[in-house]
């Protein structure tokens, strides 16, 4: 989890009357222009302007904007740095630094007046140097329409949280993702009796919710883990058919040979039953691409637990068990909801089934003969 930290290093270098205000330094007037969709390359060196608060270095640019215009700025390259934007000497927006050297840094904001804005590239500390590439683009504001079934919304987070509507017309398994290069995302779904919230279920600090949804309207709430963070994000929804052997409630008896799919509840749990009429070698797998699975088997004076005994973060238990009745708990390590496939193989179950089928066929043949 990345903790968002607002870096205002350049605010001090030209400060007049406050750390968030830039004065009329000649450096501002000489700053090169930054134009939309025309990337510029630069490099922070020991000859770059100095930020007197920590000895780090910076480079300034000028960007002409219209009032209320939505703008996205992206910093790429080897430099570990951040972006800060000023208008008439007052800080408008700033980004966090890249988590590691070479990480891309993005910033999105809405202009608060027509004029020339100052865009500052700040190195992350006095020993941070290197080349970079800077790009500014005009952002298209979200039209406010609901996302129907599948699709995506690209928008700008400008408040503590923002709500969007997902219209589900057909039941199914829905995967909803919230992705941003500008802030650590948090996604919440609410509606039709369903509720789920996720922080880092996606890649990196992105969020992901996967759950079955019935037709109806759902509210998707977007926010940042850091209270002051803003920026551009992408919200997407994708639907897949639910497996035919989907289990939605606790207490279902597992087959002695085969598999079932289960949706872990909001606390990342689902309980099954397993009955063994005779001692047997048993193998259980809990497989998921959405959560880190854990298996627990209790019964007949036996208690077994496994986390990563299978492939990757999948759980697996292989044990010789006495005859009896068992509870099989499938959970996620992070207590998150998600879909899991539970595979079961009881030694001799397949041969027993084949023997029973052969016996039934022989009995049927005998009846025909008679």
Image: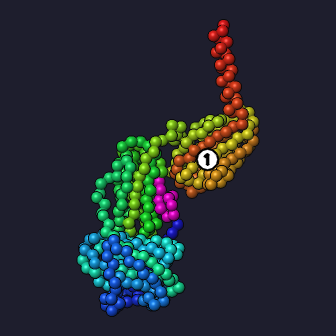
> Which residue appears at 64% of the width and 43% of the height?
328
Reply above or below: 75 against 272: below
Q: Is residue 249 visible?
A: no
Query: Where in the figure is residue 82, as x and y percent of width and height?
Result: 44, 77
Q: Quadrant of residue 172?
A: top left
> Which residue appears at 29% of the width and 83% of the height?
88
Q: Is residue 103 visible?
A: yes
Query: Where in the figure is residue 57, as x and y percent of width and height?
Result: 45, 86
Secondary structure under badge 1? Answer: strand
- Predominant SS along the magenta part: loop
Reply above or below: 186 against 29: above
Are there few (<14), some (14-19), or many (20+) residues within 10 Å of tag 1?
many
Residue at the far bottom in the pictured view: 26
Q: Quadrant of residue 137?
A: bottom left
Q: Nearer the viewer, residue 353 or 158?
A: 353
Check if residue 123 falls in the magenta segment.
no
> Which residue appears at 57% of the width and 44% of the height?
341
Check if residue 202 falls in the magenta segment.
yes
Is 173 left, or right, of 158 in this rendering?
Answer: right
Report the span colored magenta. Answer: 201-209
Q: Nearer the viewer, residue 223 or 341?
A: 341
> Which residue appears at 43% of the width and 85% of the height?
58
Query: Where in the figure is residue 276, as x and y percent of width and height?
Result: 70, 35
Query: Where in the figure is residue 116, as x and y percent of width and height?
Result: 28, 81
- The image shows a total of numbered marks equal to 1
Residue at the far top in the pictured view: 370
Screen quadrant of the C terminus: top right
Q: Quadrant of residue 24?
A: bottom left
Reply above or below: 69 against 211: below
Q: Say which residue label 1 marks.
A: 286
Is 260 left, or right, of 57 in this rendering?
Answer: right
């Amino acid at each position: 989890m990345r903790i968002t930290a607002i870096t205002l290093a350049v605010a001090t270098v030209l400060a007049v009357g406050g750390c968030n205000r830039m004065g009329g330094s000649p450096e501002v007037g000489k700053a090169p222009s930054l134009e939309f969709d025309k990337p510029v390359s630069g490099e922070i060196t020991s000859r770059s302007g100095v930020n007197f608060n920590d000895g780090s270095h910076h480079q300034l640019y000028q960007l002409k904007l219209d009032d209320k215009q939505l703008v996205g700025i992206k910093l790429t390259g080897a430099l570990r740095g951040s972006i800060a934007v000023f208008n008439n000497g007052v800080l408008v927006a700033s980004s966090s630094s890249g988590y590691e050297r070479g990480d891309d840094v993005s910033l999105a904001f809405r202009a608060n007046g027509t004029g020339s804005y100052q865009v500052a590239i700040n190195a992350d500390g006095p020993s941070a140097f290197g080349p970079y590439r800077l790009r500014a683009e005009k952002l298209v504001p979200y039209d406010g329409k609901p996302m129907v079934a599948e699709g995506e919304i690209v928008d700008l987070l400008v408040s503590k949280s923002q709500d969007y509507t997902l219209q589900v017309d057909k039941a199914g398994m829905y995967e909803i993702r919230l992705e941003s290069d500008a802030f650590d995302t948090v996604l919440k779904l609410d509606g039709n009796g369903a509720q789920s919230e996720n922080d880092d279920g996606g890649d990196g600090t992105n969020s992901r919710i996967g759950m079955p949804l019935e037709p109806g309207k759902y509210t998707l709430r977007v926010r940042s883990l850091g209270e002051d963070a803003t920026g551009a994000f992408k919200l997407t929804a994708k639907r897949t058919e639910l497996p035919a052997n989907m289990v939605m409630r606790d207490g279902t008896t597992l087959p002695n040979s085969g598999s079932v799919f289960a949706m872990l509840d909001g606390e990342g749990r689902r309980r099954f039953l397993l009955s063994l009429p005779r001692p047997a070698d048993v193998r259980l797998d809990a497989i998921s691409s959405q959560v880190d699975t854990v298996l627990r088997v209790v019964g007949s004076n036996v208690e077994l637990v496994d986390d990563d005994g299978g492939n990757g973060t999948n759980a697996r238990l292989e044990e010789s068990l006495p005859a009896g009745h068992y509870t099989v708990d499938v959970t996620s390590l992070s207590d998150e909801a998600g879909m899991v496939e539970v595979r079961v193989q009881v030694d001799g179950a397949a041969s027993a089934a084949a023997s029973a089928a052969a016996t039934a066929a022989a009995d049927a043949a005998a009846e025909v003969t008679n």
